[in-house]
Image (cartoon, rainbow, N blue to C red):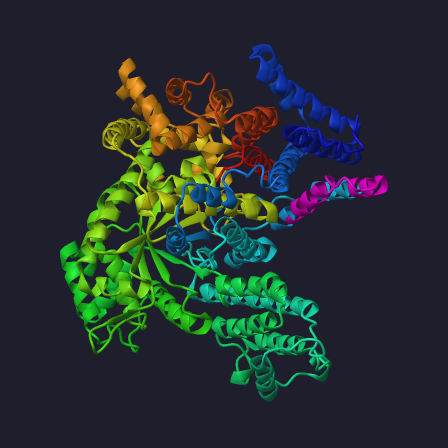
Amino acid sequence: MTETTIDTTQGSSSHQLLRRDVRFLGNILGEVLIHQGGQELLNLEEQIREMSKTLRASSDPALLQEFKNVIRSLSPEDRHNVVRAFAIYFQLVNIAEQNHRIRRKRDYDRSSGENIQPNSIENIVAELRNANVPVDQMQEILQTISLELVMTAHPTEATRRVVLEIHQRIAEDVMKLDNPSLTHREREQLREKLVSEVLTLWQTDELRDRKPTVLDEVRNGLYYFDETLFDVLPELYQELERCLRKYYPDTDWAVPSFLRFGSWIGGDRDGNPSVTAKITWETLTLHRQLALQKYEQQLMQLMNHLSFSTNIVNVTPELLESIETDKQHIHLKSEDVWRNDKEPYRIKLTYMVEKVANTQAHGKNANAKYHSPDELLADLWLIDRSLRNHFADYTADIYIRKLIRQVELFGFHLAGLDVRQHSKEHESAMNEILARMNIADNYAALSEGDKIALLSRLLNDPRPLMSPYMEYSESTMEVINVYKAIKAAQAEFGPKCITTYLISMTQGASDLLEVMVLGKEVGLYRREADGSVRCTLQPAPLFETIDDLHAAPEIMDTVFNIPAYRDSIPDFNNIQEIMLGYSDSNKDGGVLTANWELRVALKEITKAAKRHQVKLKFFHGRGGALGRGGMPLNRSILAQPPETIGGGIKITEQGEVLSSRYAIKGIAYRSLEQATSALIQSAYLAKNPQDTKDEAEFETIMRSISEESQKKYQDLIFRDSDFYHFFKEATPLPEVGELNIGSRPAKRKGSDRFEDLRAIPWVFAWTQSRFLLPAWYAAGSGLQTYVQGNPDRLNKLKQMYETWSFFSSTIDNLQMALGKADMLIAQEYAQMAKNTEAGQRIFEQIRSEYELTSQLILQITGQKEILDNQSVIQESIKLRNPYVDPLSYLQVQLLSELRSLEGTSGDGAELLREVLLTINGIAAGLRNTG
């Protein structure tokens, strides 16, 4: 029976409220199914769901066969509707869970002073105050911390923007139902509106008809700035300053802007020919348009709040003088002029709105627009001072300081755009340029030492390397045009719009020097007459494979020893940015080895930089999935060795992580609050190192475990000739590329080699098939080679889990992966392998490793079941599985039918569409998929 009311009894437990919302939304979906497909559709969906639940409770072969028969007997129309019913159910469950996170935070806030929410800003400030951390150390921590979260367009966000907007409306309406003051009619009206929204969701196509363009992806990224981040970030700073004043009341706090957002979208050209210099320029233009639009909106809103009259208050002379100056240079239309000359703030704001509107217009009077964010800030501070002059402090604090913070954070460029390109593109361009100038016949064939010597000489030579009269190949011209665009962009959009140039597959110091030499040609690097260097674009190496991680410390030591390079670092506050790739290192060596080698690289590169008195900002290329370094934002910060965060941290926010973290304001706030808390905690630990007397022994053990794990992983992935065929046939890898979820190709070179397959579809396909292999495979063998049945060694691993944060984090991530993986379902996918014998052999090897890994983790943690220590996640997985399973069985059936048409004249368009719908549904059901 469908529920018509929501229980808002205060005595309900937190978990019951979540279940209530899930049941409520599920009932609404049931009504929509009846409305759209009749009672028969709801009955069919319920039959499949009940059978799936029963199968989870008992492994009855007869029931499993009956279940498969029901799946196979579905008509195309029924199958389509059932797939969508389960997929939309997960969308609604995800909304309910996100709302519940907001509800729990509000519960803590209501009891402020009694219960402080864990991992909140107030929690960390209170802890440090209780630990007697002095004011000066707290101020030092705030001056040194830095976190930049970088949006990327990696193709794992399967949800269309229009669907996200429906989700947001549903979330807002469900949250309103918690209001105990709603009347019965208001509650009914809300329910009717929710039925309408779910119906709209049902009748909205969740699949894209075409791949998004790069500018589509740019606009999708800007959606989060527009909807949430522009407001949430200043609120976060306000909360930190509130807590600091509460626990350190004798200090006047002004928190620096330590937390910002950046982007790759429109700048990442590695393997994506659609990202050109022209596209990068258009991206920056869209960034600026949104920033200025937001400021114009904010200034217009301020006019409603700053109605102070000089009949009552005395404003400052400098405010009145600035208005007179504006009048001389800015000519407003008569209808735009604020007529009441006794309300000077409104007059000033009228001129400020006009100056913002004119900012990106060429040909305007220079005094009629803002040339930089600093000029807008000057006007805002002027207003702030005047308000405080007549004791309107509250207004200044609430409205003016918020806008000041927004301008400080977003400037006129909104977000720093990183440019990324593959190292081979620079080498190829340099090869052609040097050959045309008769400097080197075959630069690419030179030894690394000879390349470094030649590039260093070119950097120190003030003469240009290229002639404007030379013609180069199309690929070389595109490389050159990117640097020209960056130089022009820094002049047009501000020097902070692009400051970092990432180099994929960095394998030598010459890869960094090539970027500098190309930058020198357009003025991004120059040596002045007095010998000093001016540099506005920093090359940032990206170390991705295990071999690259091993080579990284020596590469950085080499570049820091090159004067032409070392002299450029002071222009970046003596900080060198270095990116570490979590995806390719995992694909290369397995999850356990990748995590270990990343940790080693972090520490060794930090040592190399310290010898040269250079601070490092590590850029962690984490994905959303466990197999790509995915984890909650705060945990990813705390997972870093504290001594490696001195120059700041950057972290990619990829794929579906963007919508799950930043589509709803309350969730965005909570995610960023947790990150801030973790950042402050890490900075404190860096200044106050903990006792690590056992760490050297632990690291020795971990090194041996990693070596054995890597061997086991590579034996299957690289040395088993049947494996790649199995992977393509036992997962929906070929079909994932048809999902139209990203502008970038799935392979770097369009080849069919495993080495050229991107890590993203690699992980995505394994997740869809319920193996989740990249997130756990070979960990068990690595651990087993150390334990070998020895109780003392097992006890040592238990000690490591209890006392060493790196090991405990690694084990808990493995638990998460094992908890989401399902070998019974995975076996159904394995049976799609054409080579039955090889498929069975490989599957049994994977299943055996799964069981070994699970067994060892339970022994190390002392748990009875996987994820016993994370009961909320454990319960969520158990509740979701019966709804995900039907989608998995349906996907196997559809893939088998679709692939049987290969080589025939059959049209598989509709079957492919159904497969893509199951991919969307499973992604929503499992989450953290990309």
* Residue 35 x/y as whole percent: 79, 35
Q: Give the quadrant of residue 46.
A: top right
Q: Which of 411/478 is in front?
A: 411
Residue sticking out furthest to the right: 185
Q: Is residue 136 above or below residue 42?
A: below
Residue sticking out furthest to the bottom: 328
Residue visible at 30% across and 25% down in the picture: 782
Q: Give the quadrant of residue 11.
A: top right
Is 177 contained in the magenta span? yes
Residue visible at 29% across and 44% down in the picture: 602
359 sits to left or right of 272: right
* Residue 570 x/y as whole percent: 28, 64
Can residue 414 be seen? no
Can residue 104 be seen? yes
State which quarter of the image contains the N terminus. Answer: top right
364 sits to left or right of 184: left
Disc tally is 0
Q: Give the quadrant of residue 293.
A: bottom right
Q: Is residue 861 above or below residue 490?
A: above
Residue visible at 41% across and 39% down in the picture: 628
Q: Is residue 422 above or below residue 186?
A: below
Is 619 contained in the magenta span? no
Q: Which residues are magenta?
A: 165-191
* Residue 736 x/y as whole percent: 50, 40
Residue sticking out furthest to the front: 250
Q: Which of 392/839 is in front?
A: 392
Magenta segment's dominant SS is helix
177 sits to left or right of 682: right
* Residue 444 x/y as whole percent: 21, 57
